[in-house]
Image (cartoon, rainbow, N blue to C red):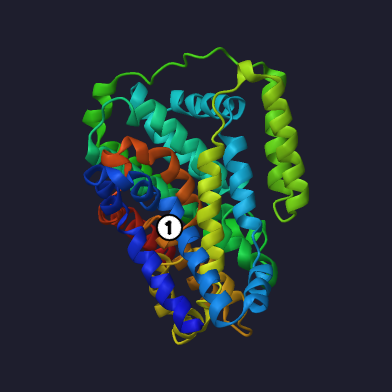
Amino acid sequence: MQWISAVLFALALVHTFSTKFFERLAHTRPAHAGVWHLLGEVEIVFGFWAMVLVAVMFFVAGGEEALAYIDSRNFTEPMFVFTIMVVAASRPVLQFATWAVRGFARLLPLPGAMAMYLAVLLVVPLLGSLITEPAAMTVAALTLRDQFYRRGVSNTFKYATLGVLFVNVSIGGTLTPFAAPPVLMVAGPWGWDVAFMLTQIGWKAAVATAVNAVGVTLLFRKELAALGSAAPDKEDAVPVPLILVHLAILVGIVVFLHHPPVFMAFFLLFMGIATAYPQYQGRLILREGLLVSFFLAGLVVLGGQQQWWLEAVLMKMDANAIFYGATALTAITDNAALTYLGSLVPGLSDEFKYALVTGAVTGGGLTVIANAPNLAGMSILRHDFRDSAVNPLKLLAAAALPTLVAMLAFRLL
């Protein structure tokens, strides 16, 4: 089963890089367009292959063992990402976030669109250390979509922005021990508190985030200047009490992120309030949230069978090699899985622990599957790319330089 699961995991990776091929099949072979569109959804990939794995388990190992394996998996993160995505993308929360970003943008000595762009790529990823990375990704992606992607910007601009966004969100959540999934996996076992994160990792991540945001803003300064001021809000303002209620629900979900019954209760409360005041809501992104959750659940199922070779690879490296190894391995597997495996090994040196975690978050922007929140951003922004698909090689190229900046920050500062 381990070898079969490794093969299926490899097929899932190939499928992830081939979604554009299936989208083209949907246009050239309309008789089965629905099936090709389904297979062309990047959010479907790992969930689909996880279903294949479970089906194979039933036939090879028996139904009892297959069900026992499913029951042994922890699906808290997929559930949490679904709830936080939907709530963070609600109109009251987005309006508050827009006010905060615009307030920061006004303090910058830059023209309208340029200041807003810099603020989104700098402030929102760092806010992920408080509101969690999936929430930060959702807010940033929706703001970029409405303020920039739908205003006729170039394809190069879109890819460069996406690369910086993914890297900055991955490293921007490391100012605290509870917001970034790869840090969350080790914070308890290794005793990493807020003071440790801020002094050892967080400030370096903030420097790299600022360098990346400023760099891409300067790179596209002419295109941003041509856009003029940021697009104004066309919707009526949401009453402040309703915004505060939504923010309280968001905080409740974040505080109880380890307790699915509690944060799901907050989510149901949110759904009730959203239904009661539809005039102050846009379309809830339930479909996008469910697709991302399905992808992550599939990664949990498939990834649980990869420990036998991942752990062997990681444990053969020293502290220097593990940093670069974790950065590379993160591109083909969720970075939280890597740090989780490290947390299971006793007697690791402090240098090894630091290298493993910083390497894992550094590579979090290289591919869609490198960091769980990437799927949230992808599901929101991909329809603004050609053929409604993001080319994985172009994303890799766009994220390469921001990733190098993060590597230099964690290794030299």
Q: Where is residue 333 in the image (x, y as percent from the top left)?
A: 45, 67
Q: In this view, does 334 lie to the left or right of 190?
A: left
Q: What residue type is labelled 1?
A: Val
The residue nearer to you, when weighing 301 against 128, is: 301
Q: Is residue 372 left or right of residue 157?
A: right
- Identify the residue under disc 1: 45
Snapshot quadrant of residue 316: bottom left
The residue nearer to you, when weighing 333 against 187, is: 333
**Residue depicted at x 68% and y 46%:** 254
Q: Position of residue 91 (x, y in %)?
A: 57, 25
**Residue depicted at x 57% and y 38%:** 286
The residue nearer to you, when weighing 302 against 138, is: 302
Q: Position of residue 53 (x, y in %)?
A: 50, 71
Q: Is mark 1 on a helix, strand or loop?
A: helix
Q: In this view, does 237 lie to the left or right of 166?
A: right
Q: In this view, does 256 lie to the left or right of 383?
A: right
**Residue at the far front in the pictured view:** 31
Give neighbour class at mark 1: few <14, some 14-19, many 20+ (Cα, 10 Å): many
* Relative height, residue 299 to residue 382 (above, below): below
